[in-house]
Image (cartoon, rainbow, N blue to C red):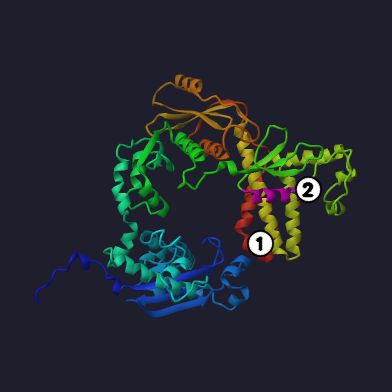
Amino acid sequence: MDAVQGTLDELGTPLREVTFVVFDLETTGGSAAEHAITEIGAVKVRGGEVIGEFATLVDPGGPIPPFISVLTGITDAMVVAAPKFSEVLPSFLEFIAGTALVAHNAPFDMSFLKAACQVNGYPPPANPVVDTADLARRVLTRDETPNCKLATLARVFRSSTEPCHRALADAKATVDVLHGLIARVGSLGVHTLEDLRGFVRAPTPEQQRKRHLADGVPGAPGVYIFEDAKGEALYIGKSSNLRNRVRSYFTASETRSRIREMVGIAERVRTIVCATALEAEIRELRMIGATKPRYNRRSRFPERVVWLKLTDEAFPRLSVVREVKDDGAAYLGPFGSSRTADDARTAMHEALPLRQCTERLSARVRRPACALAEIGRCGAPCEGRESEESYARHVRHARHAMELDAEAVFSAMEARMSRLSAEQRYEEAAVDRDRLAAYVRTAARMQRLRSLTGIPQMVAASPAFDGGWDIHVIRHGRLAAAGVMPRGAHPTPYVDALVATAETVVPGPGPTPAASAEETECVLRWLDSPGVRLVQVDGTWSLPAYGAGRLVERIERAYRHQRGDRREGRPLR
């Protein structure tokens, strides 16, 4: 019989012949490195027919957090007799052998599966993987669905199973979503497994039509701005090579649904060439904060940060404020939210008997004391039990704890957590740990920022790729000038010229007197990078000897071992 050459459409594995295993995992948290699996559910399908199921609860080896139990309905009592995942894994690997894996938000589930394989000595699964969430973003429009959550897609495709954060039910719902999506992409020429996986990676028609926007973009460091027909900034980014970065938005490597949508709206790309990569990073931050492009999520609202203020009044107190004023008060921050600032304030109140009432007090007007005075948490200056002079000691200690030494607050909170752990009140101890972390991390950050913002002028240089030097002038933590010195040139004329033309910086009040905290942190990261040399420093660059930075590692260690600490009642150490 003569051989017949197949058509191009017949290359690859037809979807009707592919065996899919659609699976879902329930876990104790979001990190495969720190959390564990509590349930696994999987459905094996081929040609639209279910040919097998796999489902079991799993003992995670530790307590399930209460909020996870509320979300999934899986409790410690349910998994106490369940097998460990090391016992389940061989059977599951056999179940998925020779199949294509499917999951909704597949990177999450695959990260846990790969981590379990590594821990138990198995090679990671080499199965092809299909992500229904990613596929849905490519196939469905915003008119059809407001988002691509599993529950939403299950309604769109009229799944017979409602997702409920239980593994097998969610896997069954994902089967219906998969079949609905395959039906959609079939009309777009997707008929094989290879087509299906490549469909997600392919650039959209809008991306292909807009490739001309990258024409003429220079191959230099700088900032790029995608603009709409009205000239409004849609998205702002930075790169060490503008040409390569802008071109990537029109290729298959750009898979973010929001950015693909932005490319479809964009009508032009404007670029600002910068002398150095650091200048590009700083310009990006400033422009995002000033214009707030709708497709930028990071750093759009730097003005929304809050501070913890030790007020400047007769009997100062700790207050959460949104503005730093030149009023002689002490400030701690910035905090990303009022809740985090309030956590830090609660930690400080554990060590410092500052008043917590909000009324303005004076030495002449008396008010009845609150319950805090009766339990020894406040000296009751409102009733005159404590004079301004004696209360001033608490104020000095509070300022010291905010600006120089976090040990008093740390020790007081550590003692409280140890007491709660000894009483087996682990959840309360965990809440206090989070409060202490909010205080220590912010104090360490602020002290690091102030070490640089207190310097009127610093000139530093780093090696450039071509053998020259990138030179930056930093004033009060703000980038004031950036330039490049060619290889072999004498540095003095370049440094002098850069300093002479640098931006004049007039510092304001507070720990960040001339730039946002993010900008100063960018400069600090660059100063910490390999090869940076200090050329001139006007002042002293140092951190407090007993600053909060030395306590950060103890906080991070507590989070790394939080499950063991909760079980065994160990204090921070």
Q: Residue 110 at what x, y percent from top left?
A: 44, 64
Q: Residue 140 at what x, y percent from top left?
A: 38, 61
**Viewer-nearest residue: 357 or 113:** 357
The structure residue drawn at horizontal position 29% and vertical position 74%, both measured from the top left corner, is 16
> Is residue 315 among what the camera can see?
yes
Residue that sits furthest to the bottom in the current view: 51
Relative height, residue 488 to residue 380 (above, below):
above
Position of the N terminus by quadrant = bottom left
The structure residue drawn at horizontal position 45% and vertical position 22%, both measured from the top left corner, is 494
Q: Residue 184 at what x, y percent from top left?
A: 33, 66
User: Which residues are drawn in magenta?
Assistant: 337-351
Q: Is residue 492 magenta?
A: no
**Disc 2 target residue:** 356
Q: Is residue 342 magenta?
A: yes
Q: Nearer the viewer, mark 1 or mark 2?
A: 2
- Label 2 is placed on what type of residue? Gln
Q: Residue 283 at what x, y percent from top left?
A: 47, 35
Is 539 left or right of 392, judged from the image as shown?
Answer: left
Asked if the residue at tag 2 contacts the one at tag 1, i.e. Cβ–Cβ closer than 8 Å, the answer is no
**Disc 1 target residue:** 565
The structure residue drawn at horizontal position 62% and vertical position 26%, both measured from the top left corner, is 539
- Label 1 is placed on what type of residue? Asp
Position of the C terminus by quadrant = bottom right
Relative height, residue 262 to residue 513 (above, below):
below
Is 223 left or right of 361, judged from the image as shown?
Answer: left
Task: Choose the circle earlier in sequence order: 1 or 2.
Answer: 2
Residue 49 lies in quadrant: bottom left
Relative height, residue 20 to residue 331 (above, below):
below
Residue 400 lies in quadrant: top right
Give the distance between the C-alpha atoms of the residues marked 1 and 2, in whole angstroms. Answer: 31 Å
Label for residue 35? none
